[in-house]
Image (cartoon, rainbow, N blue to C red):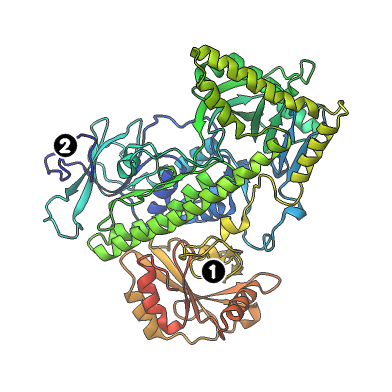
Amino acid sequence: CFSSRAGDDDDGDDDAKGKDVDVVIVGGGPTGVVLRSMLSSFNVQKSVVVERHARASTHPKAHFMNRRTMEIFRDQNAFDSMRARVREKMSKEKNWRHFRYVTGILDENEELGSVDHFSEERMEVGEKSASMEGVVHFPQHKLMPLLWENVQKKATTTMDDDNGDDDVFVRGDEVVRIDRVNSHNQASTSNGSNNRCRVTLKSGKVFEAKYVVACDGASSFVATKLNGHRKPNENKSFPTQTLGNIHFVSRSLAKRIEEKGNEAMLYFVFNKDIVGVVVAHDLCKGEFALQLPYHAPIQNFKEMFTKKNCEMYVRNAISGGYENGAVVDDIEVLDVKSWTMDATVADVVVDEKRAPRIVLAGDAMHAFPPAGGFGMNTGIQDAHNLAWKLAIAVQNDQDHDVTSALLNSYAYERKKIALENKQLSTDNYERVLEIPRALGLEPRALNALVLASNALPVPQVLKSFAFEKILSAGRMQTVLLESDRKNPLGKYRREAVKKLCGTSGETLKLKFLNEELGFSYAEGAKATNPNVLAVGKRIPHCAILNDEGDGIISTIDLGGSNSKSECRFFALVSSRVTIDKVVVEEAQKMLPKGASLKLARILSSSKDKAEKKKGNVDIYVDQSSNNAWTSILNEYTSKKKTKQVEVILCRPDAHVAFIGAFGHLPSAVHEAARGNLVL
């Protein structure tokens, strides 16, 4: 496929045989580890995670998981009790339900505005009935140990290792070369079904894999070889692309916040000394991060973010920039890192349409602004879409038609969602900019200021000095916000911010019902209410119960894997339809190796349960108080002008692949098992 050495032949030889594995996952972040867990649940045990960092990072990054991600964690075959552990460890909702716009976190001035994302006024139509899960504020550096613990437990006895080495997880190493080779002891085939990827690590360790999945960033070796170095985002919505993230702790600050009653997930701080965002990662432990924009090359990261300066920035964010402001004496700066905000989606997601072997996922495929928290969530959902397809591809590796169709469907579906989430994140970031604009701080003016300062015909130190002075003068606009200054402009700006923080959704949002739960893989389809049934969307949630002691579950829980670790497709059959065994047998013949088909009926009440389980048809009863399942079906039939829904075929990821006549189930299964939607 490609190599890190110029002039190398693409086809490798058999002299440097590596360890045979099914999948090499490059990147041990959320996407890679979730993928490894799900592959284990689908009986793909010979997979290796390669992580270039020797130790897990303790620096906070992403911190928000949306409802679809939490639904994915409901899969106990893949994640055991991890979902419950996250909810047990997460901070109380009252600590993060608000975004607050302030001159200082403990400033005595009245806050500029606040948004309660869980208020009744902020609830969208159908939100309460859309899922059994809610959103979660839980930082990535605390999520990762749980994910690693889960996947290590599952992998304890799954890989043969003649040398006794632990090749399930390779830490502190990185990929330096990948070659497309022919598998050993097999003749080359015209369709590439015997091809493998020889993955060479910096340490010299070699793996020969059926598939390689890169989810370790846009600048990783694999991602750049597929797409080249991505061009920086050209969208002018990003006047502050590079930020310093100051990780600090202060239990006194957390205690003062609780006493004041102004808990929040995010504090947007605007004062004469600082404009930045403080993320309250864990108020119980006093853990925070201050995000400050800086503007290279005018500002130098190392010079700007010394420990002494970082402590000063934190104090200014707390006090409002006043010498006699609130004092917190236990600030401890743990570390500071630079990160660049971007909005990109890779052009190439699988290496080629015929016999694809290399796949991108997570931040190797896409990067978004943090507004809305779609980065980590989209990556985890990439893994959810890919896992069952990759599992079937691994177990049917000689069937080129099946493997190519599955991986190409992954590329199309997840690139579609990535592009939609990129636009949504960009639009959401635009909402972020409305607040500083209302305060007289035009973010886009920074671009012009950087360019103008950089063009000055003077030494760099003088360019930086001029830039800092102009930037400081601009921040003086915030002095007008002091509540003891009775000036008309300050009052007008305060009122403008409060208006933006109203229920109109004109500033930064936290929850996106349709985009979280109602996105669609169907071509041209936009995200809509998740309670509406449609091909390409996740099956609408309905609380259901059977007689097998599983307790109340959701319709989305019917997918995943079965007791034999097979990828479980499921068909919801109308109670009015007589199940034809011949049709069922034909449908099962359409399944590739490693896949199964579950048939189920959902009844409106327990009174209808005279029809107990017959054969392989499971019976569930709608547990909602308003006959939710019947309402979902009635809405669909009314819209489509049809008498009834005979069968709904869903994939292991709980997305609907087909809605129609029961007699068409075999052909629908054939297409769905190849990743296709039947519209």
Q: In which quarter of the image is residue 131?
A: bottom right
In screen coordinates, is 619 left or right of 598? right
Q: Can residue 306 be seen in this view?
A: no
In screen coordinates, is 425 left or right of 195? right
What's the CA distance linking mark 1 and mark 2?
61 Å
In screen coordinates, is 33 left or right of 4? right
Name which of mark 1 and mark 2 comes first in the sequence: 2
Q: Quadrant of residue 484?
A: top right
Q: In this view, does 29 lie above or below 651?
A: above
Q: Mark 2 points at which residue?
A: 7
Circles 1, 2 touching at the beta carbon (< 8 Å): no
Residue type of the residue flagged with mark 2: Gly
In screen coordinates, is 441 left or right of 229? right
Graded by Cα atoms within 10 Å as few (under 14), some (14 to 19) or many (20 or more), the crowding at tag 1 reads few
**Element at label 1:** loop
Please tell me whether mark 1 or mark 2 is closer to you in this view.
Answer: 2
In the image, 212 versus 581, the foreground residue is 212
Q: Where is residue 617 in the image (x, y as percent from the top left)?
A: 48, 77
Mark number for residue 548?
Answer: 1
* Quarter placement of the C terminus: bottom left
Which residue ends up furthest to the front in the rendered image? 457
Residue type of the residue flagged with mark 1: Glu
Q: Which residue is located at x 51 percent, y 82 percent?
A: 646
**Element at label 2:** loop
Q: Can residue 186 be seen in this view?
A: yes
Q: Is residue 41 above or below residue 550?
A: above
Q: Position of residue 455 (x, y in %)?
A: 50, 21
